[in-house]
Image: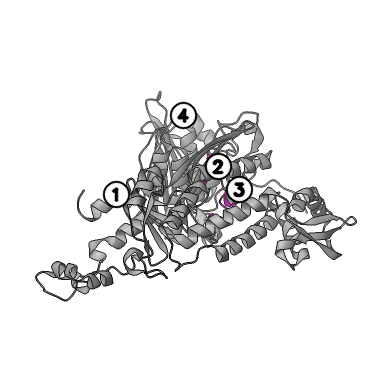
Amino acid sequence: MTIRQLSETLINQIAAGEVIERPASAAKELIENALDAGATRIEIATAGGGKTLLRVTDNGSGMAPADLEMAIRRHCTSKLDTDLLDIRTLGFRGEALPSIGSVAKLSLLSRTAEAGEGAEITVTGGRVEPVRPAAANRGTVVEVRDLFFATPARLKFLKSEKAEASAISDVVRRMAIAFPHVRFVLSGADRTTLEFPATGTDRLARIAQVLGRDFRDNAIEIDAAREGVRLTGFAGVPTFNRGNSLNQFAFVNGRPVQDKLIWSALRAAYAETIPHGRYPVAVLAIDIDPALVDVNVHPAKSDVRFRDPGLVRGLIIGAIREALAREGDRASTTGASGLMRAFRPEAARPAAAWMPSASPYRPFESAMASPTAFREHQAGFAEFAAPSARGEPAFAPSPSIREEEPPQRHPLGAARAQLHENYIVAQTEDGLVIVDQHAAHERLVFEAMREALHARPVPAQALLIPEIVDLPEDDCDRLVSHAEEFARLGLGIERFGPGAVAVRETPAMLGEMDAAGLIRQLADELAEWDTASGLKARLEYLAATMACHGSVRSGRRMRPEEMNALLRQMEATPGSGQCNHGRPTYIELKLSDIERLFGRS
């Protein structure tokens, strides 16, 4: 079989299969070019989900006519010279424009600041037209029409127009977060416009534009560095979580990335604080020497490889956990918002539904004249409706409590009542707090058990007959290298020949267990993430279950001193803002919100 050179158009179409997977991929490449050109205003217009039209307009440095001819040629770029280890721009491969031109109708209109007129070049399915003069503002306009018309098979794999338009919106949002000093405008065929005005150096303001104002109120700032790697950004409090990972953003040297190491570190940092199936909201930016990270892993440039992945993972986990320990116990404002909606007058029942049936003209006098009726209509407040075993109220506020426990002295205030024998109402200096007594005490018990679990080696039970687990040699090497770590958790292993591991001890608190299954799970984790947290997670899950059964139960009447003691212990315990299952343990309502409910502000 004769070997022959492929045509330039066919080479570009093959490259387009990797570089330009969908309209969002083309939008990403064109926006990156605009940012590399120093643009401060970028406008993106689409039609048909980007399949019919994709136009990107910027006010960057522009290109001369000779540069336009070079820009559409494969592997021609102004962003890379000779050092592939020193990449400081978003683009560098020189593949995007020729790849787009080989499968679509592409036109480039550009003018530099020094030029008196602009120039335009067009490429249709790989066929290049000569450069011609054209009227243009400073900057560049790249227009892509009929994407994949030259490769109809690729069109069959695209999703609906709505889905493709949504993917382009996601690209713009990620770029907007990475470059807050740039104004982004995205318009579609349905005449809707998505606009992100420039916020300068205020990154949190830009993030609030993209993720909503709630994130600003529930974000914790992160700023940490280790061995030349710096991590900045914002992470949401644990109770501010979502049902998917679409609100997680990561950037490496300003480049939006989708890196599994970063996502696994983020997941590990929020372990035991967010319920299963929920995801934290976070924006993380990593600044690192370009020589220590490889961005040339895939033509799409969304994957990266760190020279020291353990360093980056440890930095992310440590910085986020430190931030959560510092500020993560505060209640999410979304809980207070839900409480406000529940209390709105239009959502309340009609007055006639709860007023006593006495005089229609003087209902309040009639109610106050009957203490029994008043108590009936205040059912749920323990201080009125829940007598204790001694026949006394379970909680009756007294002057001594106000003198001994002034609200301003404590973040969670002083207990004032118990609702439905499950919720503690506490008064703070500027509002009130409602605490779920079971969830709060469950977290306190769990933290105490976990601290004891990590303070000393976990008791182990020796197996009468060691269990031999056959594994590939690489897995055995990785497991044995972590043997000391496993021993502290009660798991004793040792090498048993070239392709097997002998399990001699297992954690006593786990009882009878599938040791072979655990070993294989740990081996898979080590191979995938270079860390094995499965055993630790099992032990902590068991501790959480024991804490749930050993904590204050719902329905128990608590004395004032017990409620205040619980509040004080919550304030002193990290992570007490959410229970072991990730649900909030308390909701805070500001006095200004209460006054707004009554129309006083």
The residue carrying mark 3 is: 265
Q: Which colour scheme is used?
A: one colour
The residue carrying mark 4 is: 64
CA gap, disc 1 and disc 2: 30 Å
Q: Nearer the viewer, mark 4 or mark 3?
A: 3
Determine whether 514 is above or below 10 in the image. Answer: below
Q: Is mark 3 on a helix, strand or loop?
A: helix
The magenta span reads 249-273
Which amino acid type corresponds to the residue marked 3 in the rendered image?
Ala
Dot 4 or dot 3, earlier in sequence: 4
CA gap, disc 1 and disc 3: 38 Å
- Point out residue 152 in the picture as x, y percentages from the top left corner: 53, 59
- Point out residue 481 in the picture as x, y percentages from the top left corner: 80, 48
Q: Is residue 477 shown left or right of residue 453?
A: right
Which label number is shown at residue 322?
A: 2
The residue carrying mark 1 is: 591
Dot 1 or dot 4, earlier in sequence: 4
CA gap, disc 1 and disc 4: 62 Å
Dot 1 or dot 2, earlier in sequence: 2
Q: Nearer the viewer, residue 407 or 82?
A: 407
CA gap, disc 4 and disc 3: 45 Å
Dot 1 or dot 3, earlier in sequence: 3
CA gap, disc 2 and disc 4: 51 Å
Which amino acid type corresponds to the residue marked 4 in the rendered image?
Ala
Would residue 41 be seen by someone viewing this image from the given angle?
yes
Q: Is mark 1 on a helix, strand or loop?
A: helix
Question: Callout 2: few (<14), some (14-19), or many (20+) C-alpha neighbours within 10 Å?
Answer: some
Residue 184, image quadrant: top left
Q: Nearer the viewer, residue 44 or 267?
A: 267
